[in-house]
């Protein structure tokens, strides 16, 4: 099984590639405990970005919009939102290859958000976020996963 940090690193690399192809300047956050993973420059402003791994579930890309602290011993809070701390979620979904740039105000920030890849079965459109609206690129990370018997590194 691939380590979650490796999955996240692969998503961040895919996101950075798509952002670069779109002409964004990219700045890296230093350290593990920063709320934003990247700062991007669109030529007019700097925007704080939190990178997320999306997973295709029931025709939609699902991604976490809050951090979980449940795994910490004696957590003071179980979930922490990104409200006021980032401007955008950048989401990479390996199943679709899509990279999506989503303003934080477009999604609920307490748990999980969904971007529809396929129309809903009941054809509902109101309150549905279509993935194509947010897609900034398609990236293949084939071959970047963990190697057999290893952790994905070549040390």
Image (spheres, helix red, strand yellow):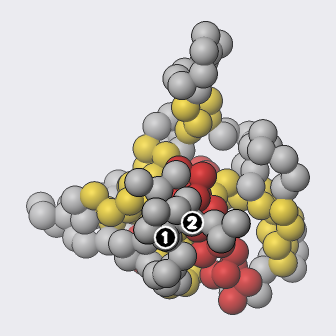
Residue 137 rendering spot, x and y as whole percentages: 55, 84
What is the tally of numbered marks visible in this picture? 2
Q: Quadrant of the N terminus?
A: bottom left
Mark 1 or mark 2: which comes first in sequence? 1
Tell me the residue at 43%/44% (across/down): 112
Q: Is any part of residue 103 visible from this angle?
A: no
The quarter of the picture where residue 121 lies is bottom left
Q: Give SS at disc 2.
A: loop
Q: Which residue is mark 2?
A: 152
- Residue 11 left/right relative to 148: right
> Where 5 sits versus 147, above or below?
above
Tell me the residue at 53%/44% (across/down): 65
Q: Is any part of residue 142 visible from this angle?
A: yes
Q: Give SS at disc 1.
A: loop
- Residue 29 left/right relative to 53: right
In terms of depth relative to the viewer, which is nearer, 121 or 139? 139
Residue 14 rendering spot, x and y as whole percentages: 60, 75
Residue 127 rendering spot, x and y as whole percentages: 35, 54
Q: Quadrant of the C terminus?
A: bottom right
> Where 9 sits versus 110, above or below?
below
Residue 147: give its label.
Answer: 1
- Residue 28 left/right relative to 120: right
């Amino acid at each position: 099984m691939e380590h979650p940090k490796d999955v996240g690193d692969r998503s961040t690399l895919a996101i950075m590639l798509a952002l670069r192809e779109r002409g964004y300047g990219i700045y890296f956050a230093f350290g593990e405990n920063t709320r934003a993973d990247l700062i991007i420059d669109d030529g007019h402003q700097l925007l704080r970005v939190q990178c997320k791994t999306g997973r295709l579930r029931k025709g939609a890309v699902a991604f976490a919009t809050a951090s979980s602290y449940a795994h910490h011993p004696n957590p003071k809070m179980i979930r922490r939102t990104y409200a006021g701390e980032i401007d955008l979620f950048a989401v990479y979904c390996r199943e679709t290859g899509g990279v999506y740039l989503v303003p934080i105000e477009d999604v609920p920030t307490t748990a999980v958000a969904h971007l529809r890849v396929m129309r809903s079965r009941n054809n509902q459109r109101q309150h549905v976020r279509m993935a194509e609206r947010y897609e900034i690129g398609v990236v293949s990370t084939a071959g970047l996963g963990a190697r057999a018997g290893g952790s994905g590194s070549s040390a």
